[in-house]
Amino acid sequence: MRRTGRDNFDRQTDRQTDRQTDEYSALIRLCQYVFGYVSIELGSIGKVSMCKRIMKAETSPDGDVPFYKIGTFGKKPDAYISREKFEEYRKAYSFPKKGDVLISAAGTIGRTVIYDGEDAYYQDSNIVWIDNDESVVLNRYLFYCYQLQPWAVSEGGTIARLYNDNISRAKISVPSIEEQKRIIAILDRFDTLCIDLSSGLPAEIEARQKQYEYYRDKLLTFTPAD
C-alpha cells in the first residue's frame, strides 16, 4: 500500500512524541535517583479527561448502564443510559481505563473513586480523570495523593468548581515506582483496617482514622535530600 505524505507525517509525529515521553521519563528517574523524589504537575503525566456529554433526555430511571451524576458519584445511581449509547460513546470519545482515579469537580470537590472496569458512564465536566499510563505515577499512589487535596479551587462563580487547569497545575511529590509500591502497601493495610473496623466502636474507628491520616501525610510528604 502506498503511503501518503500525511501518513509519513503522522508516523514521524508519533516517533517524536514517543521520544519526548521517553526523555521525560528518564529525566524524572534521574531526579528521583538524585533527590529521592520529584515534584511534578499532574498535567505532565496525562490529559484531564471526561466522558462525552449525556443529555437528560438520553437517561431513564432504569436501563442497561448506570449513569453517575455528581449527586450519585460514589453512591447508588438513579439514572441509566442505553447499551447502544454507552458503546457508541465509549468507543468514540474519552473513557476511563480500569484503575483510573475519577475526581469530582463540583459538589464535594475532590472526592475520588477508582474506576473498577464495570460498565458505567459519568457526567461530563463534573467527573473527570487524568489519562495516566502509570509509567511515572501508579494510579493507586495518585489516589492517596488526591486525598491530600492538592487543588486550587476556583470560587469566582456561583459555586466552587475544580476546573481542568486547577487539576493540571496541581503538584504532587513522586518517588520511584518501587517506593510508591511500598507506600501503597502500607496505606492499603491502614485502609483495610479502617474498613474492618466500620462495625466497631465509634471511638476506635476515629482513633484508627486519625492514625491512618497521620501516616498517610507523613508518607506522602518529602523533604529535599541534603
Image (spheres, rainbow, N blue to C red):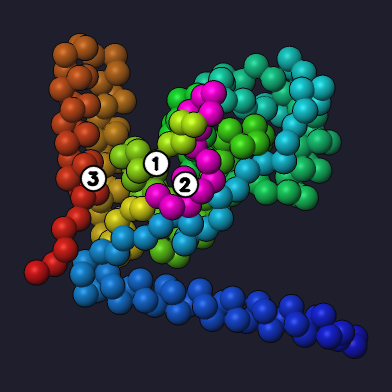
Residue positioned 29% across, 64% down in the render: 38
Q: Position of residue 17 (x, y in %)?
A: 59, 76
The answer to whether 105 appears left or right of 203 in the picture is right
Residue positioned 54% across, 23% down in the render: 158
Q: Quadrant of the N terminus?
A: bottom right
Whole-Å distance between the Cαs marked 2 and 1? 6 Å
Q: Amino acid at mark 3?
A: Ile
Disc 1: which residue: 151
Q: Position of residue 61 (x, y in %)?
A: 73, 15
The crowding category of the residue bearing disc 2, from other C-alpha atoms within 10 Å (few below 14, some 14 to 19, many at least 20), is many
Q: Secondary structure at mark 3?
A: helix
Is label 2 in contact with label 3 (beta carbons under 8 Å)?
Answer: no
Instruction: Give the magenta part as a residue range.
Output: 157-170
Q: Amino acid at mark 2?
A: Ile
Residue positioned 21% across, 66% down in the render: 36
Q: Quadrant of the C terminus?
A: bottom left
